[in-house]
Amino acid sequence: MLKQKNVGFLLLFSCFLLSACGEKEKQATEINVPEINAPQIEAPQIEAPQIEAPQIEAPQIEAPQIEAPQIEAPQIEAPQIDVPDLSITSDNKQITIQIPDTVLFDFDKSELKPSAQEVLDKIGEAFKKYEGAKVQINGHTDNVGEEKYNTALSERRANEVKRYLEKNNGKGSLHISTKGYGESQPITPNNTEEDRKKNRRVEIVIEPKM
């Protein structure tokens, strides 16, 4: 009975020793390894140098000032026609001859007066200086009477002057056209008889060949 108790005690003691040894081995194996933090190495900040491109100034070149030559258009020489009350003007394009209606026609008539032929002969003689020129014959009236009648009268008078000039100065030497304006183009207001007299006229416009 005593042997059995000793054996049990020994087994129990052996288990205790084994347990103690296992615990020490476990503690020996469980070694806390310290954590080593690797040092943080900061990369150096390198600033790139600022290189300014050189400023190149464009040369200032002044264009030469060229003055255009002043060319004056030549004035067309007006013919010298010795006729009283005749008005002759000219510019660099044309010559305008104004003839009062009383020089060419009786009142309200479109047939040339005998004295008008001498006047037109002198004008026709002046035309020889402008061979091949364009000629426009315009008839004008005052504002007395109906507008339609005045226009027709001015047309008949312009055509009568054209007919005479072509007949007596050679049809081929001039290029003549006519226009009757009636009362539509007065050169002065039709307020007085003197003003209306100025508006009753025949205009011969000559455009020489340049």
Image (tube, grey):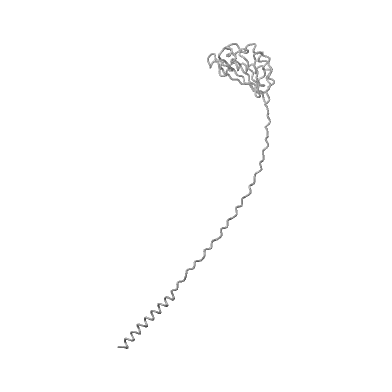
> Compared to 31, does 71 lie above or below?
above
Q: Quadrant of residue 193?
A: top right
- Count of numbered badges drawn on the protein: 0
**Residue 9, percent across and down?**
34, 84
Q: Nearer the viewer, residue 17 or 159?
A: 17
Residue 177: quadrant of the picture? top right
Which quarter of the rendering shows the C terminus?
Answer: top right
Residue with the most extreme left position: 1
Q: 87 and 154: which one is in front?
A: 87
Identify the image quadrant of the N terminus.
bottom left
Where, by quadrant of the figure, is residue 16 drawn? bottom left
**Viewer-proximal residue among 167 and 118:** 118
Answer with left or right where residue 149 lies relative to residue 25.
Answer: right
The percent coordinates of residue 138 (x first, y second) are 60, 19
Across and down, in percent, residue 66 comes to 68, 34
Looking at the picture, does residue 34 appear above or below residue 93? below
Residue 100: x %, y % from top left:
62, 14
Q: Is residue 65 above or below residue 167?
A: below
